[in-house]
Image: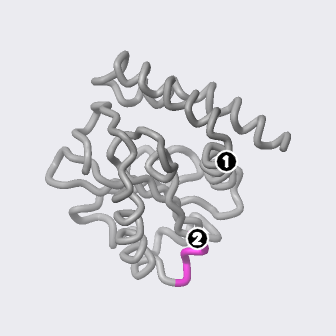
């Protein structure tokens, strides 16, 4: 479990990923308390049968992103680290083993935001459309070879596919 910072390596789906999510979700539930409206397993590790980087992505939906400020101090010590330049509308918490093995990415978002809704809609669409999930897996495998040492380019290169899936999901 985990991957060296900056690298890309896919593994076949592992049913232990769901258990690992559950364990971390319990920890996050204690930390966030009633501020967490949802704690969801997202990303490729949440989709049965899909190859993925061995990093568990978790969405924590809260009412107002400013509410995170009250909890920020709980994530400023190891094994957690708050990303300094997060995506707008999100706080990203990285959980690592040591200095350079990322194990969890915790995306804190407003539960009613487009970003949160799209993240869950994408996951659900892939869970329910096996053919699209296989297309996504094929793309991920190609990009993992091309960008094995450049995770930002790997991630950015999936954006067009993700947007096309969200468009389909919105039509359904």
Task: Answer whether labels 2 and 1 touch (C-beta < 8 Å).
Answer: no
Query: Quick one: SS at disc 1?
Result: helix
Front residue of 36 and 134? 134
Residue beneath label 1, please? Answer: 128
Which residue of the protein is positioned furthest toward the left in this rendering? 98
Q: Position of residue 113 (x, y in %)?
A: 69, 56
Check residue 35 for magenta coloring.
yes
Quadrant of res 6: top left
- For label 1, the crowd category at 10 Å Cα-Cα, with few meaning under 14, some 14 to 19 and many 20 or more, is few
Front residue of 152 and 122? 122
Front residue of 129 and 23? 129
**Residue pictured at 30% horizontal, 23% vertical:** 148
Magenta segment, principal secondary structure?
Answer: strand
Quadrant of res 5: top left
Seen in the picture, residue 68 relative to 96 is either above or below; the reply is below
**Residue pictured at 47% horizontal, 69% vertical:** 69
The tag on residue 62 is none
Residue beneath label 2, please? Answer: 38
**Residue pictured at 46% horizontal, 31% vertical:** 155
Mark nearest the camera among 2 and 1 is: 1
Q: Which residues are magenta?
A: 34-38
Check residue 24 for magenta coloring.
no
Q: Position of residue 26 (x, y in %)?
A: 40, 77
Seen in the picture, residue 132 relative to 23 is either above or below; the reply is above
Taking the image as shown, residue 159 lies to the left or right of residue 30, namely: right
Front residue of 46 and 149? 46
Query: Quick one: SS at disc 2?
Result: strand
- For label 2, the crowd category at 10 Å Cα-Cα, with few meaning under 14, some 14 to 19 and many 20 or more, is some
Q: How much space separates mark 2 and mark 1, taking CA atoms?
A: 21 Å
Which residue of the protein is positioned furthest toward the right in this rendering? 171
């Amino acid at each position: 479990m985990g991957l060296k910072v900056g690298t890309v390596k896919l593994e076949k789906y592992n049913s232990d990923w769901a258990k690992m999510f559950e364990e971390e979700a319990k920890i996050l539930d204690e930390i966030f308390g009633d501020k967490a409206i949802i704690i969801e397993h997202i990303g490729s590790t949440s989709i049965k049968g899909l190859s993925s980087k061995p990093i568990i992505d978790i969405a924590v939906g809260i009412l107002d992103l400013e509410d995170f400020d009250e909890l920020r101090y709980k994530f400023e010590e190891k094994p957690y680290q708050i990303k300094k330049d997060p995506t707008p509308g999100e706080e990203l918490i990285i959980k690592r083993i040591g200095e350079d093995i990322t194990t969890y990415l915790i995306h804190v978002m407003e539960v009613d935001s487009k970003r949160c809704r799209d993240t869950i809609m994408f996951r659900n669409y892939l869970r329910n459309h096996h053919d699209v999930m296989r297309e996504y897996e094929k793309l991920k495998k190609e990009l993992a070879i091309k960008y094995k040492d450049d995770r930002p380019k790997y991630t950015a290169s999936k954006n067009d596919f993700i947007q096309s899936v969200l468009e389909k999901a919105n039509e359904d």
